[in-house]
Image (cartoon, helix red, strand yellow):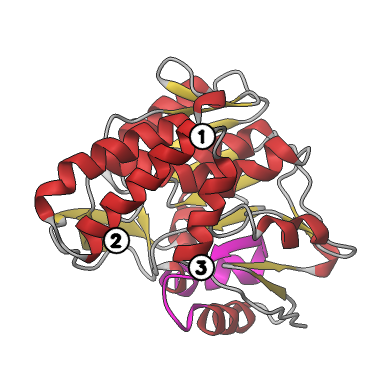
Amino acid sequence: MQIMQKQTGRAGTLESVLIILRLCGGPGDVVVFLWRTVLGVCVLVIKVTPLRGLYEQVTIVCAKRLLKPYLRDGYLDFNGVHLACGDHFNYWRACIEVAQDTFYGYVSNNDRYDRAFSDKSIKYTFEGPYCYEDDTVDIMIHPGDTVLDLGAWAGDFAAYAAKRGATVYAFEPDASNLKLLERTAMLNKGLPGHIEVVPLGVGAKSETLRFYSDGDAGSGSRFEELTGGAPSSVSVVSLDDWTADNNVKVDFIKADIEGFERYMLEGAQQLLKTQAPVLSLCTYHLPDDSEVMADLILKANPGYNIVQRRAKLFAYLPQKT
């Protein structure tokens, strides 16, 4: 059985501006954000490259102001869930969005993700939360779950899942992100669950691929050429191979892997068929993501129900939720 709901997509430019304005704590925050927006137009649209350094500096200042309630010495504290801080522009640019998508419901809605909140969250998040609850749907992390966090970045979702009591295998192939991810794992040692860092990518088969990093702990590294991206070779595994080799039973998979989600599903057909983990997958990277991913999931296991919300696809077996 398949359930499809209208996809609104990732927040556009105007929506993103409104989201960040809602985060502003006062006139000073608004001024810094508007200044950053003007510089962004100059650098990214008009291509006034001499202003890039200033734009990056103002972006860092803006992010730190917006996240000030959670900012500690070297990390962010979201009600007991800790995220290591980076030093660079790419980290802080991503952090504003990540903080909203991963932690908005946890911090502001008592960690509840019902249909009404999910609809409301469109106004406050860039992609929407990774969790979702409805009358018959339970896309949530439960104590004792084993979670695969694919594209773990600095460990935001991994830390959240550990807070919920899960054992998390956090997959991240980008070397600059791995340093932050390892720090995040250390910062969250006292949580009910724990984080195991896996320095690998995931794909259709186990192989070595050319990997392009956007550098400095950014969230947009991928297995395709980036303008100015630094290429390297990384090991990629299929989840069918990895789970079999490590004897891991999986309950929940989260994936934000820059358009590689479909290849991950190709390499997880046996896993979906035999273990049927709950899936929470990003669907905004490629125009046909929703359709291609749904087809691959149902090909592996026709028993899955599929719910499309904003820029996330959720899949589950009814008897398991």
Is 185 part of what is drawn in magenta?
no
Instruction: Give percent across and percent down for residue 318.
Output: 82, 68
Classify residue 293 as left or right of residue 191.
left
Q: Which residue is mark 2?
A: 222
* Image quadrant in which you'd find residue 157: top right
Whole-number angstrom distance, CA of label 3 to CA of label 2: 19 Å
- Secondary structure found at label 1: helix
Depth check, front residue: 218 or 147: 218
Residue sitting at x 39%, y 68% = 260
> What percent of the width, then of the height, locates residue 195?
52, 33
Residue occupying the point 64% across, 81% down: 298
Give the side of residue 32 with respect to residue 283, left or right. left
Q: Which amino acid lies under the numbered mark 1 shown in the image of this protein? A: Pro
Whether residue 39 is visible: yes
Lower position in the chain sequence, tag 1 or tag 2: 1
Camera-nearest label, 3 or 2 = 2
Callout 1 environment at 10 Å: few (<14), some (14 to 19), or many (20+)? few
The image quadrant where one finds the N terminus is: bottom right
Disc number for residue 27? 1
Q: Which residues are magenta?
A: 263-289
Q: Label 3: few (<14), some or many (≥20) within 10 Å?
A: many
Labels 3, 1: front one: 1
Please state which amino acid type lies under the numbered disc 3.
Ala
Mark 2 belongs to which amino acid? Arg
Residue at mark 3: 268
Which sits in the foreground, 32 or 307?
Answer: 32
Residue plotted at (64% across, 57% down):
123
C-alpha distance separating marks 3 and 1 = 49 Å
